Image (cartoon, helix red, strand yellow):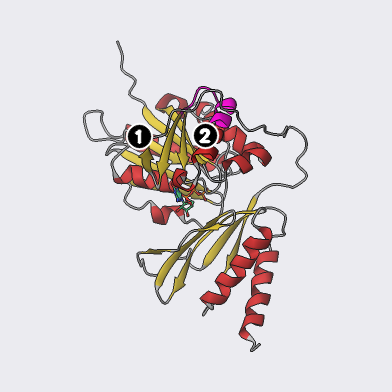
Amino acid sequence: MTTDTRLRLTLLGGYLGSGKTTWLRHQLHVGGFGPRVHVVVNEAAETPVDDALLVGAVGMTLLAGGCCCCAGRVDLVAALRGLCDARSRVSADEVRLERIVLETSGLADPAAIVDAIQSDPVLVNHIVIDETIVAVDALHALAQLATEPLGRRQVGAADRIVLTKTGACTPGALAMLRATLATLNGHASMAGAELGVEVAMAELPAGLVAAVLPDLTGEDARGPILPTQVVLPDGLDWSAFTLWLSALLYARGDDLVRVKGVVRTPAGRLLLQTVRKVVQSPEILPDQGENRSDDVIVFIGRGYRPDDLGRSLTRFLSGAARPA
Ligand SMILES: Nc1nc2c(ncn2[C@@H]2O[C@H](COP(=O)(O)OP(=O)(O)OP(=O)(O)O)[C@@H](O)[C@H]2O)c(=O)[nH]1
């Protein structure tokens, strides 16, 4: 009997802001993937943030500026081939890499990534994808599934669904979401998590009715969801900026799916994050000296032109700077 010695790969997907990095960060902290793990993080935006949160992984490769299921596919294959090559140079009885965890961008279709790996003649001989985990945001998923075909494809690709933000959800809404996810993917296992820590979920009551999801097979007139970024001016007035952001989310929170970035303030480097209209309390990150990603905010959404947000902020700040 031969043993399969190929590298294992866990694919971690899920919609924008669904909690992939938070869950992975906790898993790495508790050693959930073992010691010989390498993390590959893909961010659709050119200015990455997730790598700052995942420092501490045994090794990490960052693929930023293109989603690996489409524009960034070639870079993904090259990065994975590089890891396989490095592993091949280490003999089987030495300490060598056992697992890759690939955190996809929130815009990725996991099935397309599986296809990219399995259709590559080198990777297919070196890597076995043993699980696709998909994070689902319990707070926003029903709204997403009602309007976003991508969200449904991600759920459909899962072997395991991790329901995040369960603490912020009522038991009734959570039960209905679980019943709805089961109609989209009957074979995936489901677990709950709060900030990465697994939480037990109650038995689903018998006869629970799933939400009725509209048909999304027609043309989507809203256009694609794309990342754009705004470079913050030197000496930014932090309160004026947060006021502008709150007004923007209030007015356009359904179009603006995700905002994230690191802002330098007198209090330190603040990680700023929003998912739809929910603004997370900023987290202070360690000071790492000059970082080219600081003071650049990534906005991911649709329904506006790339320059609109920067122009709106500039106008707002110049108005805020004038005495009333
Ligand atoms: N309350 C609560 N907040 C969470 C949980 N998981 C994630 N969050 C918050 O949700 C926001 C998005 O979390 P991330 O882990 O960055 O999500 P992501 O899927 O990696 O985001 P993208 O890579 O941008 O798609 C952050 O503000 C997190 O703090 C959770 O289980 N509970």
Residue 302 versus residue 161 in the image, above or below? below
Quadrant of residue 96 within the rendered picture: top left
Residue 147 versus residue 130 in the image, above or below? below
Query: In the visual, does 277 lie left or right of 170?
Result: right
Instruction: Tell me what residue is drawn at x 68 percent, y 70 percent.
Output: 312
Q: Quadrant of the C terminus?
A: bottom right
**Secondary structure under badge 2?**
helix
Residue 232 seen: no
Query: In the visual, does 89 lie left or right of 69?
Result: left
Query: In the visual, does 74 lie left or right of 54?
Result: right
Disc 2 within 8 angstroms of ligand 1 (CB): no
Instruction: Tell me what residue is drawn at x 44 percent, y 66 percent.
Output: 270
Amino acid beneath label 2: Ala
Marks 1 and 2: in contact by CB < 8 Å?
Answer: no
Instruction: Tell me what residue is drawn at x 67 percent, y 81 percent.
Output: 319
Q: CA distance from mark 2 to mark 1?
A: 33 Å
From the image, state whether disc 2 or disc 1 is nearer to you.
Answer: 2
Where residue 35 appears, as percent x and y from the top left, is: 27, 39
Q: Which residue is mark 2?
A: 175
Residue 276 seen: yes
Give the residues in magenta: 179-189
Q: Within 10 Å of the Cα at label 1, are there few (<14), some (14-19), or many (20+) other Cα atoms? A: many
Where residue 190 appears, as percent x and y from the top left, is: 45, 30
Query: In the visual, does 237 lie left or right of 191?
Result: right
Q: Quadrant of the N terminus?
A: top left
Q: Which mark is residue 148?
A: none
Q: Give the camera-side residue of 159 and 10.
A: 159
Residue 264 versus residue 123 in the image, above or below? below
Q: Which residue is mark 1?
A: 99
Instruction: Tell me what residue is drawn at x 66 percent, y 76 percent.
Output: 316
